[in-house]
Amino acid sequence: MADSLIDLRSDTVTRPTPGMREAMATAEVGDDVYGEDPTVTALEAEVAALFGHEAALFAPSGSMANQIALQLVVPPANELLCDADAHVVTYEIGAAAAYGGISSRTWPAVGADIDPDVIAAMIRPDGYFAVPTRAIAVEQTHNRGGGGVIPLATLRELRRVADDAQLALHCDGARIWHAHVADGVPLTEYGQIFDTMSVCLSKGLGAPVGSLVVGSAEKIERARLIRKRMGGGMRQVGILAAAGRYALAHHVERLAEDHAKAARLAEAIAPFGVLATTARTNIVPLDLSKSPLDAHELAAAAREAGLLISVLGPRTARLVTHMDVDDAGIDRAIEVLTGVLRA
Ligand SMILES: Cc1ncc(COP(=O)(O)O)c(C=O)c1O
């Protein structure tokens, strides 16, 4: 990727900073499959404590962390409820069914605007005549839902729904940090609501790789076994855990800057009628249904002018701000987009 291109496709495109590389280079390591990598152990303890949970487990990707968590809370041939746009059923390539034998049923895609009553009405009880629901998964922030943040009050209401039906609640918290920074909700408050969480260090926090499953000590012990079965046992992986620890120490509070950049981008293109919703965090969703350009045409024209954006559908696209695009880069992106949309 030429450095002159401004890349707003995703917040996963960031590269480790010199400080992060230094932390990686000097990390103490050991064989983590033997449980002997001190940097991994420290990261796991730190993340568990951040969410007020007993334990956490380092995993190579957000997808694997989600799928380990789902296998913890939904036995084979039982059901998961989530929304139709959830990452777990959109981008994880059928993993819940393929690896966990999990049957997934979805509520219509509403991003972060979930209605606990609608979800409650979908729950199927135990019995031999229907697939029993065992867990509900939500996404915070919601990726395809334009970075939307589910309000804490709604999550508490959903917890009540789950408790009434004795279901587990999972959070795909790949960008839970963004929700924490946007709404000021302490991470421990989020932690209290969920039985299992997956959180990512490589979505906006700048680490090259790494996610964690968070839960009770008993669940994380089982998670370790599931991770190994899925081929996710890693050896001297403290090098990567060090990047994650560095990211947590240095790159969480600065997400406010990425949110401000997204708001500035959204404001600048609002007059062109292509915004899908207000940008609340670092994702700016574009709805091109009334635009003369479709998503591929917009992306191609932007690329020609040095800006990369994501195409999500024929008439939907997405811009994501992150630490590798500074204010000058956002100015340039605004120039490109307004130029293309005006033409
Ligand atoms: C909401 C959400 N969950 C999970 C993931 C999966 O992460 P990974 O790409 O590390 O598997 C992503 C990736 O972008 C995501 O946006």
Image (cartoon, rainbow, N blue to C red):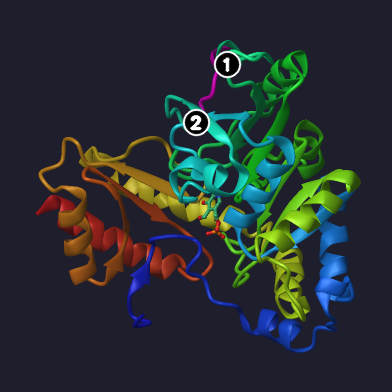
Residue at the spot x=76%, y=13% of the render?
A: 164
Provide residue 258's location: percent of width, then percent of height: 53, 57
Residue placed under numbered mark 2 in the picture: 83
Marks 2 and 1, how far apart in space? 20 Å
Residue at the spot x=73%, y=63% of the render?
A: 228
Residue at the spot x=78%, y=77% of the render?
A: 238
Ligand 1 location (quadrant)? bottom right
Mark 2 within 8 Å of ligand 1, using the beta carbon:
no
Provide residue 67's location: percent of width, then percent of height: 62, 49
Closest to the observer: 120 or 227?
A: 227
Mark 1 within 8 Å of ligand 1, using the beta carbon:
no
Provide residue 47's location: percent of width, then percent of height: 81, 56
- Residue type indicated by callout 1: Ala
Q: Is residue 113 magenta?
A: yes
Q: Is residue 263 magenta?
A: no
Q: Is residue 66 left or right of residue 15?
A: right
Up-down: is 318 above or below 24? above
- Residue type indicated by callout 2: Asp
Question: Element under label 1?
Answer: loop
Q: Magenta stretch? A: 112-119
Residue placed under numbered mark 1 in the picture: 130
